[in-house]
Image (spheres, rainbow, N blue to C red):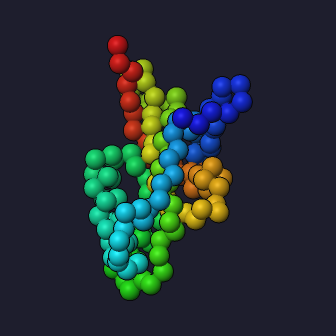
Amino acid sequence: MIHMRNGELRGYQVGPVRAELRELTVSDDREGMLEGTPQLHRRFRLMGIEKAMAKTPHLYVHDLDKLRADAEGRVEEWLPREAVHARLTSWWQPEDIAEHGHTVLSVMWFQTAAQDPFARLATIVRPLDWTSLAKFVPFED
């Protein structure tokens, strides 16, 4: 969990909704990879991403269309090495839901080690529509 001073969570503007960062994970996307090509690497990543999206419908993958196009083409450039996953929550909830709860959105992207994942997250989520991407999670009794 990422905390800021005074125990407050780091906040991000996602379209018109204010969301809080609950988790951010950075991993080496090529860890354990013995050999391969940039195109093959993209194809494997895309298969994993599509499987994750089927299990987690509130997962937004930044530049997914570009990844798909690159996997179909002859790309000789490797994806950036770091895979980043973030989980954000908000008190916003759809008007048609009477239950108490919150909404959650997971975001994934690739970046280089030199990039700041917090700044990159802010850039990625600012134009997104939280109301159409996030999933409502009711509170449990």
x and y percentages locating residue 67 in the rendered image: 41, 70
User: Which quadrant: the N terminus?
Assistant: top right
Q: Is residue 10 above or below residue 68?
A: above
x and y percentages locating residue 33 in the rendered image: 36, 68
Residue drawn where x is 51% and y is 61% of the image: 82
- How many marks the image carries: the answer is 0
Q: Residue furthest right?
A: 5
Using the rendered image of the protein, determine whether residue 68 is visible from the camera's viewpoint.
no
- Is 108 or 2 nearer to us in this picture? 2
Residue drawn where x is 31% and y is 68% of the image: 44
User: Which quadrant: the C terminus?
Assistant: top left
- Is 48 or 15 nearer to us in this picture? 48
- Is 64 or 34 nearer to us in this picture? 34
Residue drawn where x is 42% and y is 83% of the image: 75
Q: Is residue 70 above or below residue 88?
A: below
x and y percentages locating residue 134 in the rendered image: 43, 42
Residue drawn where x is 42% and y is 65% of the image: 30
Q: Could you tell whether 110 is left or right of 119 in the image?
A: left
Using the rendered image of the protein, determine whether residue 117 is visible from the camera's viewpoint.
yes
